[in-house]
Amino acid sequence: MARTADHQQRRRQMVDAALRIATTEGISSVTVARVASQAGVSVGLVQHYFPTKRELITAAYVEVLRRTDDRIADLVQDGERTARPIRVMAQAALALLLPLDARRRRECAVRQEFAGLAVRDAELRKVAAANDARSVARLTAVIRNGLVCGEVPPGVNPERAALELLAVVVGAAELGSRAGAPRDAHAAVDEVIARVFSGECREHA
């Protein structure tokens, strides 16, 4: 068990180093040598865990998406604990994906850079597709819960509304980052959320 934990810690150490470089300097600056230096290990040790740079980049992409997912899960858990309306939780969760402050601007930039690479890289594309599928499934479940409690009016198609929300959030994040108008992007996302969750929760009425 100890050796398994040690291997996992070593991998996380190197992936963390790769993400620090990618976030501050861009993915093109991520090299095995730079990661080794940043992590305080030898080049040979990095290559032992990640024989190719591609494997290292893929692991970093998985990790940056996992971190975002974890923060969204924590936010939703807190919202459920404090009995917040679903619409409020959806607004707060999706706002984590927008470049609304320095931290989120950096995260948006690195996610978008990874997504750009995924267009031409099959392994990264699998990671992106799996993440999109999870996001749509999560949003679909949220909208179905809204239908049950009354926040989402009857007749709304949960899957279609989830796809619309995801598309708007992804587009708003990219436009907000590129155009430097994140508040406008945030307003656009909130408008779609308000349209989907236009009812009133019977529990909060």
Image (cartoon, rainbow, N blue to C red):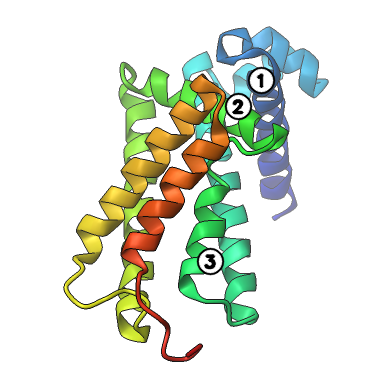
Q: Which amino acid lies under the numbered mark 3 shown in the image of this protein?
A: Met
**Residue located beneath label 3 in the image:** 89
Circle nearer the viewer, 1 or 3: 3
Residue furthest to the right:
40
- In the rendered image, residue 54, in percent from the top left (x then y), is placed at 47, 18
Whether residue 19 appears in this view of the structure is: yes
Residue nearest the observer in this picture, 198 or 42 = 198
Q: Position of residue 151 (x, y in %)?
A: 37, 77
Q: Amino acid at mark 2?
A: Tyr
Can you tell which of label 3 and label 2 is closer to the viewer? Answer: 3
Residue 35 pos. (x, y %): 70, 17
Residue 49's disc number? 2
Task: Tally the numbered discs.
Answer: 3
Q: Cα distance, mark 1 to mark 3?
A: 40 Å
The secondary structure type at the circle numbered 1 is helix
Three-letter code for the amino acid on which mark 1 is drawn: Val
Confirm or deny contact between disc 2 and disc 1 (CB under 8 A).
yes
